[in-house]
Amino acid sequence: MAEPYPATFWHRDCTLCGACCAAPDIAALNKPLGVPCQHLDRGCRCAIYESRPKVCRNYTPDWVCGEVAPLPTLEARVRRFLEIYGLA
């Protein structure tokens, strides 16, 4: 029986969109919902990647990343991320 979704739907390579570091709240970093992480640099890379908290280490890029990555700005990507999860 064929899978209803391809494997890439559930797991993707990071698109460097930055939405996962801006949209969700990250309690371990005292980061509120919808606010970019203080450690997210201008290139949408983690400035503390080697020492990032477990919640960040466990994040796996998925279909949401593919949905938001094409949007032109971090603000637009965060807005779409929050809409997908019903948080906006």
Image: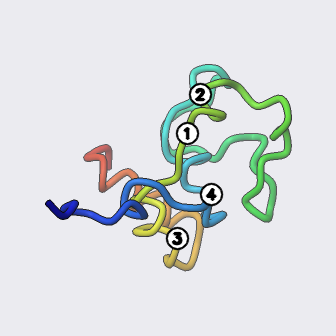
Query: What is the CA distance from the residue labelled 3 to the residue labelled 1?
Result: 16 Å
Q: Does 81 sit left or right of 39 as displayed?
A: left
The residue tagged 2 is: 55
The residue tagged 4 is: 18
Looking at the image, do the residues carrying marks 2 and 4 touch, with CB atoms under 8 Å apart?
no
Few, some or many residues within 10 Å of mark 3 (<14, 14–19, 20+): many
Residue type at the position of mark 4: Gly
Few, some or many residues within 10 Å of mark 2 (<14, 14–19, 20+): few
* Element at label 3: loop
Indicate which disc residue 59 carries: 1
Depth check, mark 2 against mark 4: the one in front is: 2
Q: Looking at the image, which residue sits at the far left?
A: 1
* Element at label 4: loop
The residue tagged 3 is: 69
User: In the rendered structure, which disc, 2 or 3, sits on the residue that comes first in sequence?
Assistant: 2
User: In the rendered structure, which disc, 3 or 1, sits on the residue that comes first in sequence?
Assistant: 1
Tell me residue 12's x, y (percent).
51, 60
